[in-house]
Amino acid sequence: MGISRIRSRHEPYEIAALAAAPVCGVLMMTLDVRPISVQTAMPGPIQMAWELGLIAVGVGGMLGILWPGRLSTGLGLELASVLVLGTITGMYAVALVAMSGRQSLVATSFVMAVMVGSLWRATQIAIDLRRLARACEVVSCESLQAGVT
């Protein structure tokens, strides 16, 4: 078997997005301000879930990146977070287009880039988890738990 390489969990753009997400969620909830497209396109309970999702994504993702224990646990937390981030940014893109149409082209493009980046990172993490599982079959799992082969 060749050398398995697990991608770094220190992706600067991912960390920036995950760090900004809970700040945005908390600000929307505490200041009771939301983008007009969200207020108009999403019912109240969905808005609340979207805001809580932003908070959960950021906290969970950063927890996964900084996880001191098993590598697979940290990667699993990070995977769940970037999948949810991709989903909720997609929700926001739909709300933008639904409310502003062509006028939202620039903002929608940027938000869609965050969505694509999140789903891309989720794919990388899924591949890494599969590599880690294969490596556990070949090598003693105890040596891999700390991320050292």
Image (cartoon, rainbow, N blue to C red):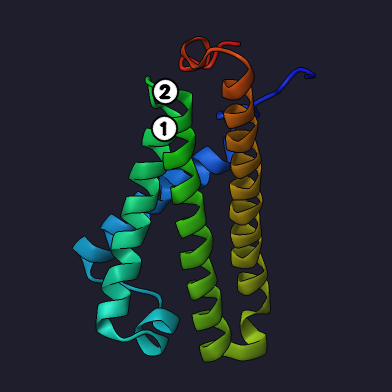
Q: Secondary structure at mark 2?
A: loop
Q: Quadrant of the C terminus?
A: top right
Q: Could you say which disc has been placed on residue 17 in the image?
A: none
- Relative to 135, 66 lies left or right: left
Which residue matches tag 1?
73
Camera-side residue of 110 and 46: 46
Above or below, comparing residue 76 to residue 72 in the picture: below
For the point 59% across and 61% down, the residue is 115
For the point 37% across and 84% down, the residue is 42
Rendering coords of residue 26 (x, y %): 27, 56
Above or below, comparing residue 148 to residue 136 in the picture: above
- Relative to 73, 122 lies left or right: right
Camera-side residue of 123 and 130: 130
Rendering coords of residue 136 (x, y %): 57, 22
Camera-side residue of 147 and 51: 147
Q: Decide: few, some or many residues near mark 2? Use Cα within 10 Å; few <14, some 14-19, many ≥20.
A: few
Which residue matches tag 2?
70
Above or below, comparing residue 18 to residue 10 in the picture: below
1 and 2 marks in contact (CB < 8 Å): yes
Amino acid residing under circle 2: Arg
Above or below, comparing residue 82 to residue 75 in the picture: below
The residue lying furthest to the right in this view is 2
Whole-Å distance between the Cαs marked 1 and 2?
5 Å
Rendering coords of residue 121 (x, y %): 62, 46
Amino acid residing under circle 1: Thr
Q: Decide: few, some or many residues near mark 1? Use Cα within 10 Å; few <14, some 14-19, many ≥20.
A: some
